[in-house]
Image (tube, rainbow, N blue to C red):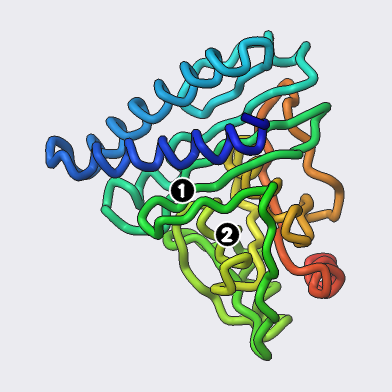
């Protein structure tokens, strides 16, 4: 398999495993989220170590080590992005599998298992045209104040949604137009969504417009902007205002 094919295959299979764990009726709520996280993570890390033994690895659910810092190629994964949504049997959760090369997110796949979709960086499609009133996806429980302020300036409507992957993919799917996050994230939250979004021609950056960088010593990567290229300047200008 190519790297892109491997990323998509792993995201899809991990998604199937997670659906089976949920459908087993052995867990519920937080225990379901924990069981899903651990089960999917074990599959992903063992598969990657088997298929790409010389590459680095960073996972939300595994202890981080300094070994990855010496690698040019590092797989960055989130076995369940949106653990709360998964535990509540909602559809807005995702599986992230990405490959960062020299600090850039170059290859990625985001599985949306409840929707039966895997969006991939190697199979970009056309992003639907923006509607007259823009839609901004925000956290279901704690919308970032910056996002609320920008939405007010742009006359955009807020669309509550779960995981970061689901939010970013909503733009590609035509269900949203802007994803602006400032509440704190890590590399595994955005690496795969950024790779897929950029492959589809979308703008992805930090909130100050600087590029997203991965495989850093500290994986904390707190803010993110994903939108159409045509909306990039108006969003960045609104942030400065």
Label 1 vs 2, first from the N-terminus: 1
Question: Mark 2 highlights which residue?
Answer: 169
Q: Is residue 42 above or below residue 106?
A: above
Q: In the image, residue 9 lies at what x, y percent?
A: 51, 37
Res. 94 mark: 1
From this view, report whether residue 175 is shown above or below residue 179. Answer: below
Residue 131, picture quadrant: bottom right
Task: Name the residue: 47% across, 25% down.
Answer: 44
Badge 1, how many Cα within 10 Å: few under 14, some, many 20+? many
- What's the CA distance linking mark 1 and mark 2? 10 Å
Give the vertical position of 82 relative to 234 (above or below). Answer: above
- Picture coordinates of residue 183, whole percent (x, y): 60, 50
Q: Mark 1 touching mark 2, by CB under 8 A?
A: yes
Circle 2: element type: helix
- Tell whether 63 sits left or right of 89: right
Q: Quadrant of the N terminus?
A: top right
Which quadrant is home to the C terminus? bottom right
Query: What is the x, y in percent for residue 102?
Result: 83, 27
* Residue beneath the point at 74% across and 38% down: 105
Quadrant assignment, res 192: top right
């Amino acid at each position: 398999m190519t790297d892109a094919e491997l990323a998509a295959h792993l995201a899809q299979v991990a998604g199937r495993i997670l659906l089976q764990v949920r459908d087993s009726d052995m867990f519920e709520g937080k225990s379901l989220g924990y069981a899903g996280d651990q089960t999917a993570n074990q599959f992903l890390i063992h598969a990657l170590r088997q298929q790409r033994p010389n590459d680095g690895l960073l996972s939300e659910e595994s202890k981080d080590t300094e070994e990855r810092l010496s690698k040019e190629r590092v797989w960055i994964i989130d076995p369940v992005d949106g653990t709360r949504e998964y535990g509540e049997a909602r559809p807005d959760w995702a599986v992230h599998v990405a490959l960062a090369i020299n600090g850039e997110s170059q290859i990625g796949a985001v599985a949306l298992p409840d929707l039966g979709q895997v969006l991939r960086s190697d199979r970009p499609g056309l992003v639907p045209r923006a509607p007259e009133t823009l839609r901004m996806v925000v956290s279901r429980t704690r919308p970032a104040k910056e996002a609320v302020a920008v939405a007010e300036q742009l006359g955009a409507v807020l669309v509550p949604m779960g995981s970061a992957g689901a939010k970013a993919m909503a733009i590609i799917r035509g269900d949203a137009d802007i994803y602006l996050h400032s509440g704190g994230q890590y590399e595994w939250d955005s690496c795969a969504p950024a790779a897929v979004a950029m492959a589809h021609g979308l703008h992805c950056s930090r909130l100050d417009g600087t590029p997203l960088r991965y495989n850093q010593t500290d994986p904390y990567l707190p803010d993110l902007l994903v939108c159409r290229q045509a909306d990039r300047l108006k969003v960045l200008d609104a942030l400065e205002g």
